[in-house]
Image: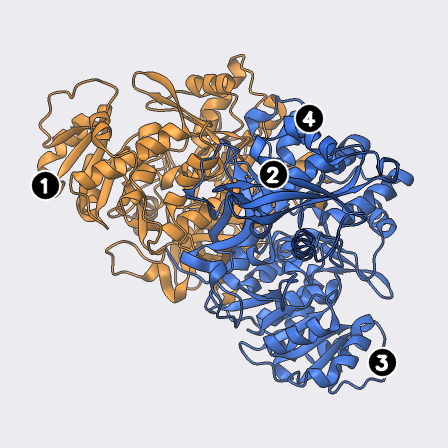
Chain colours: A blue, B orange
Amino acid sequence: MMNVPLRVTAMIEHAEAFFPKKTVVSRTASGIRTFTYREIANRTRRLSSALKKIGVQKGDKVGTLAWNHHRHLEAYFAIPGAEAILHTINIRLSPAHIAYIINHAEDKVLLIDQDILPLIEKLKDEIAGVKAFILMTDEQELPASSLEPLYHYEKLLEEGEPSFTFNPDIDENEPAGMCYTSATTGNPKGVIYTHRGIVLHSMALGLADGGSVSESDICMPVVPMFHVNAWGLPFAAVWFGTTQVLPGPQFTPKLLAQLIEREKVTITAGVPTIWLGLLKELDEGNYDTGSLRSILCGGSAAPKGMIKAFETRHNIPFAHAYGMTETSPLVIFSRIKSYQQDLDYEEKLNIRAKQGYLVPGVEMRVKGASGDVKWDGNEMGELLLRGNWIADEYYGDENRSAFEEGWLHTGDVVTVDEEGTIKIVDRTKDLIKSGGEWISSVDLENALIAHDDIYEAAVVAVPNPQWQERPVACVVLKDKAKGKVTKEDIKEYLQPQFAKWWIPDDVLFMDEIPKTSVGKFLKRALRDQVKDHYAGAQTLEK
Amino acid sequence: MMNVPLRVTAMIEHAEAFFPKKTVVSRTASGIRTFTYREIANRTRRLSSALKKIGVQKGDKVGTLAWNHHRHLEAYFAIPGAEAILHTINIRLSPAHIAYIINHAEDKVLLIDQDILPLIEKLKDEIAGVKAFILMTDEQELPASSLEPLYHYEKLLEEGEPSFTFNPDIDENEPAGMCYTSATTGNPKGVIYTHRGIVLHSMALGLADGGSVSESDICMPVVPMFHVNAWGLPFAAVWFGTTQVLPGPQFTPKLLAQLIEREKVTITAGVPTIWLGLLKELDEGNYDTGSLRSILCGGSAAPKGMIKAFETRHNIPFAHAYGMTETSPLVIFSRIKSYQQDLDYEEKLNIRAKQGYLVPGVEMRVKGASGDVKWDGNEMGELLLRGNWIADEYYGDENRSAFEEGWLHTGDVVTVDEEGTIKIVDRTKDLIKSGGEWISSVDLENALIAHDDIYEAAVVAVPNPQWQERPVACVVLKDKAKGKVTKEDIKEYLQPQFAKWWIPDDVLFMDEIPKTSVGKFLKRALRDQVKDHYAGAQTLEK
């Protein structure tokens, strides 16, 4: 057999050859326009050529600060097409983190959306390594700017060569892209995506039992193209000749609903927060969403109630997936097996609310307190992954603790049942290790939140001389229950649901749980507060 | 990104982990039995271990002479699992060719079905390089045999280790399988399949727009497992947890129809001859074939009438594909694009009767008389292919004429239209080169055969001093037309359908066209006869 390099550019060549009439519907600052793949491929070749003309060399990083639109899509292929590295930058990070990322990656050129220009102008002096800026604008002329040199994207394209050919003989293990994680602690960490990884991941997205992305689909990635390559969908969609709808900057649930209706979107993808917003819009509005065959949801666990609401109220099938920046991201996909089809809806929902089983092409281990865990749906362990679209390092980072022994240590604690269905029960750092056994803080929290009188709850470990750690529940009561519900009430409520040693030693009633800027529990801060509380340094309870 | 070897054994590990309850329905000499993938994986591990115990070394070829059944499926994974090479041998070849293949490949061990045992016993002295024979039998005891040593497959398995582990760190470019072409001239030529090639080809079979093989499918490969790995379906089906129905030895159209009905087969694959037989059975019998979502047809062009008959009379969707032993085989798949869906049935049928467009992961060129052809549906050229499941040599053969410049030269002459739809118009060796232009013998033959008075027809080139070559039609008239239809009638009939220079210079009326053992026109012999005819050495015409 031949050994032909797997390469990103072969995907756009395929679209150009076999799907020249298929289209990309792109919303930019000035409106919605449609391009054929013939046009997109022509513009991509011009952009590759133009990047080389302005000095981009093999292996250079070219950053993008942009929403989901056709120019960003062209950059997805043109930057690797110039044998450079597509570095998508999360525009939602803090300016300090954005500057850090640009410098850490050593970006040579930045492609910038017009509404992000002011931010980059402010950072100008901190990112002196950047040699050129390209403005992705709909305007005829460049605005006045302190950035220099600043190129006009469309004028660069005019000067680029439409006959530029992509090197067919690259090394498939060369980087094609990179993306930094949005680290909750410390600086963001960079993940490199190789040509090989992107192509194989795209294949997984096209598998009938994976994303099932098809030529007949109309795909709207809502997940940003600056975050894990919009889950790889733009790559896969181009390869398979799928019509794409790119929703552009600053979209609202209303806009998404309108696009779904108007463009007859068949598949869309994003995080639960997006779908909560869309659900409200669909509930209140009057949209025809009959074209939708699948909402792909990942990033964090989809609440069962939301899945059910989409399916029963709007007849929109909902698909649950799991991944992370380090995994390209698709590695686990929730799918009902053929012999489970006869189960009733609630039973199937219980299966589908778990993360699912492994996508072909990825291998896993689940490492518990003492070796690989039993697949009994009960024993907990950290999920370890291995595969061609899994990171093997953080860029420029010597700390290899997340990559020991050739596996990615995800930091997610899971159970696996005899069907191979994976359920995330905690993050390793939030897990409570009591007497050599593991207690899931998430399971306890879910039970607490289901209590009628509880507004929110977090469970954290406190050090314990005998058991190593013991769980303590931090509970915010609803106003009506304040002063009425006791610690003992809460413990009694939990007792029938859990083993005796899972029951928290204490229940602390608080006014609120500390949270991150995106609303996740800040467990590290909470643990410190609880420790201080028991040391007498701080009183948490009202 | 990690670089993890793509390997055949990862596919059965995936089935074992995530689809242990899914099944393989296997028909053998003694009846139909069902095995779970847990059992198949266990038996596969035992077989790998047993092969090593009897002396199979890394890189050894292990031949199989077997029908489609569970033991052959186990060998598909166990032989590469022992880091040896699965060499499937076409049991329909002549004994001389079978002996040649076994010797040319240097097979160390042969796995043999009981009904094929007598053939191998006869060849025993000619294949002295084979060190061991394994009989895949349902019987408790081995029959008396002159082969030595002869092992009992099931007893070997009993001695094998179910805990045998597959090497996770092989080189993905190592051979995993091999198969010889059924050459029409000369000796068969060997094609090597690498782990990488098989895995990537399996992914193509799983793509929504490829074979779309899914866990929810019930797949019955009718194409033999001794021929191009049954088009790779057993590999893909295991990986995706697809239920398999393996129809075993000496099946009939009736048996296939019964299996489709009984096992609720959703997808099946084979050559046109098989489907002509099945069509007759379905027309005459009374079967419920409502489960079938696709008949996959390849090997040679599917007649439009047959496609239509399956779809209109039996409501069974028919899918046309193109490949060859050298291409694993799937490279071209006939698929109606989304914007073609509104065409009427006949127009779509005209598209679908062509070979289709390229599967993602493969690249093509079409090389005409003067460089790459225009994609206008008209200009003809030889189809050249490049990709990870395309052969780059014939095993042990120094002649590299089919692999020049890094492309497989298929020997098939095609046109490509502006949609990228490929239509095979001839074999290069049968093409007529007249005045620097190409004439398709197949197009002329199809037109001739559509004439009411013509029973069969072949068009061949005769040397011409002015034009290099000119076409001559060899025509067998139906009895009723003999002596009535003239050469001029035939030429007049063709004139409105073709350019003037395509019209054959002569029409020779014959009693029959020479054919191969499988009913294909023997054009080489016909060309010689026609040459002799014009030289006065032989009179072809009645």
The kind of residue tagged 3 is Glu
Question: Is label 2 in contact with label 3 (beta carbons under 8 Å)?
Answer: no
Instruction: Give the residue at mark 1.
Output: B128
Instruction: Give the residue at mark 3.
Output: A141
- Which numbered disc covers residue A346? 4
Q: Label 4 vs label 1: CA separation? A: 64 Å
Image x and y of residue B314, in percent? 59, 22
The kind of residue tagged 2 is Ser
Image x and y of residue B348, in percent? 66, 39
The kind of residue tagged 1 is Ala
Q: Label 1 vs label 2: CA separation? A: 53 Å
**Secondary structure at numbered mark 2:** loop
Q: Chain of mark 3?
A: A
Evaluate whether label 4 is on the same chain as label 3. yes
Left-right relation of B92 to A218: left
Whether residue B532 is situated above or below residue B287 in the rendered picture: below
Whether residue A4 is situated above or below residue A358 in the rendered picture: below
The structure residue drawn at horizontal position 46% and vertical position 16%, both measured from the top left corner, is B258
Instruction: Give the residue at mark 2.
Output: A334
**Secondary structure at numbered mark 3:** loop
Q: Chain of mark 4?
A: A
Label 2 or label 3, whichever lies nearer to me, is 2
Image x and y of residue B316, in percent? 58, 27
Q: Label 2 vs label 4: CA separation? A: 15 Å
Relative depth, front residue between B351 and A102: A102
Looking at this rendering, what residue extends furthest in the front direction? A536
The kind of residue tagged 4 is Glu
The structure residue drawn at horizontal position 12% and vertical position 40%, both measured from the top left corner, is B131
